[in-house]
Amino acid sequence: MKNFLKNNGLWILFAGAVISVALALMSYFSTTSAPLVNAVNVMVSPFRSAYTAVATWFNDKQNYYRDTTNLLEENAALRKRIAQLEADLRQAEDDRKENETLRDALELRKQRRELELESAMITERSVTNWTSSLTLNKGTSHGVESGDAVIDGTGGLVGVVREVGLNWCTVLTVVDTDTSLGAQVFRTKDLAIAAGNFSLMEQGRLRLELLPAGCQLLSGDLVQTSGLGGYYPSGLVIGTVEEILVDDSGAASYAILTPAADLSSLTEVFVIKSFDVVT
């Protein structure tokens, strides 16, 4: 045995080394790819990274486009809904105003049964340095005549009919310079004249003139039509006293009146076609 090892020991060591190297190589290649496959993977790895980046960018853009499209569709739907709600709100406001006008008209007819009223819509306004007038959609075919008084839904005096056509009429408002009405202070019963004035017309005001001596007016006093002469019904509210002044001579006082009717916002009025004189 000793002779065998002595004579063949070098070959045995060489064989063991070869076997060891073979085992090592087998172990290495069993845990990694084949050399050719590994080389291919090394070469395509940058392209694989680029593809992944492009795919990720494309997916992000696709998701962004989808989200943007959804938002645009949602915004369009919301805008449409808002427009519908605004239309509904405007209609509700119109209905409210109409109902309010109808209630006022009903109440007015109950309170002033002696008045024969014709409702009319305002179709045009004319406010210049020389006149303040309204055009209504009622005329002679509806029994409207020149000189008829016109009031709002609360009984406030709007003006007097000046011209009449078949289906229209023109009304000079209480602040027009050609308007002059017999008036009475409700609190004191003093008689006077309510008349339009050039300097006040642009302000939507009128004057209460020819006040009796010693008249004790107060700011806020209510002024109505006197009904004297039978031209207009009595008790129509012309306006309220805003300010008491003295004329240039210093001998007489007059008052500035604010009209009871809101002339700038009226849409419907009532023409007094006839009335019974209340005694």
Image: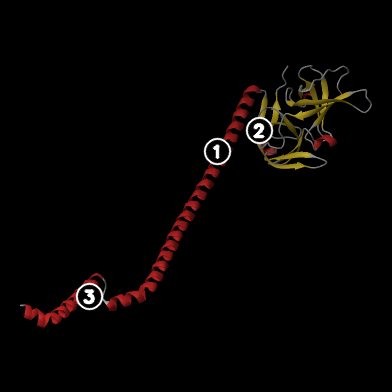
Residue 157: x percent and y percent?
Answer: 73, 29
Mark pair 1, 2: CA separation = 26 Å
Which residue, given by chain and number where applicable, does mark 3 sit on? 25
Q: Residue at x 9, y 79 (%)?
A: 5
Mark pair 2, 3: CA separation = 116 Å
Q: Amino acid at mark 1?
A: Ala
Of labels 2 and 3, earlier in sequence is 3
Q: Residue at x 46, y 58 (%)?
A: 69
Q: Amino acid at mark 3?
A: Leu
Label at residue 29: none
Of labels 1 and 3, earlier in sequence is 3
Which residue, given by chain and number where applicable, does mark 1 sit on? 92
Would residue 148 be seen by someone viewing this image from the given angle? Answer: no
Q: Amino acid at mark 2?
A: Glu
1 and 3 marks in contact (CB < 8 Å): no
167 on left or right of 163: left
